[in-house]
């Protein structure tokens, strides 16, 4: 009889996979974006930094930073969902992931941002909701908030081109 792995081992493997995935986007690291995983819920965190301010008179987060935060959240959220399924199914080798050999990320086809209010000079959070994820195309909605999740300051709608699934040949 095969014994299940201890929960600490599974948790460490999941956290490691998420760290490798998030680390594959250098601009996310430049902005300071990190990801917090609780069960199957993934939250992006954009810690406040003076370099993120676009209008010092207000002060407010730069619109490009807000858009990048939404787009990175969508890409990593979608990749995490896809990657984890492949990882758990044994189609992805953890040793290769540790060496930095990750499958390609989805590519943005179309991206729309709704700026609802100014992003204030404080930490921001975002979550992606995958509306559709097929073999070739995915549709993801993202919301970003600061102090109150019920009052988002920006919403994003992202359409992405899916890379070949791990273990599938590229066309």
Image: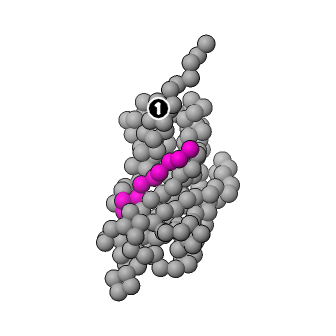
Residue 125 covered by magenta stretch:
no
The image position of residue 154, as x and y in percent, is 54, 72
Residue under numbered circle 1: 8
Mark 1, secondary structure of its residue: helix
Looking at the image, residue 94 sits to the left or right of residue 109; the answer is left
Residue ID at (46%, 75%): 119
Residue ID at (46%, 44%): 18
Task: Determine if residue 13 is in view.
Answer: no
Looking at the image, residue 82 sits to the left or right of residue 147; the answer is right
Residue ID at (31%, 72%): 50
Give the class, few, some or many, for how many residues have Cα within 10 Å of label 1's Cα (few <14, many ≥20): few
Q: Is residue 130 above or below residue 13?
A: below
Q: Which residues are magenta?
A: 31-39
Residue ID at (35%, 86%): 57
Q: Is residue 121 above or below residue 58?
A: above
Quarter the C terminus occupies: top right
Task: Determine if residue 53 is in view.
Answer: yes
The colour scheme used to paint the residues is one colour
**Of residues 56 and 139, the one drawn nearer to the viewer in this rendering:** 56
| Quadrant of residue 84 within the rendered picture | top right
Residue 38 covered by magenta stretch:
yes
């Amino acid at each position: 009889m095969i014994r299940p792995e201890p929960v600490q081992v599974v948790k460490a493997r999941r956290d490691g996979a998420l760290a490798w995935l998030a680390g594959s986007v250098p601009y996310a690291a430049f902005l300071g974006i990190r990801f917090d995983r609780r069960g199957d819920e993934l939250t992006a965190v954009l810690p406040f930094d003076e370099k993120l301010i676009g209008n010092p008179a207000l002060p407010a987060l730069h619109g490009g930073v807000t858009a990048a935060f939404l787009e990175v959240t969508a890409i990593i959220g979608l990749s995490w969902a896809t990657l984890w399924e492949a990882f758990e199914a044994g189609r992805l080798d953890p040793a290769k992931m540790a060496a930095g050999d990750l499958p390609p990320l989805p590519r943005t086809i179309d991206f729309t941002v709704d700026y609802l209010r100014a992003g204030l000079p404080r930490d921001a959070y975002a979550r992606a909701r995958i509306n559709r994820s097929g073999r070739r195309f995915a549709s993801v909605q993202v919301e970003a908030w600061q102090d109150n999740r019920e009052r988002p300051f920006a919403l994003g709608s992202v359409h992405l081109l899916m890379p070949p699934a791990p273990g599938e040949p590229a066309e």
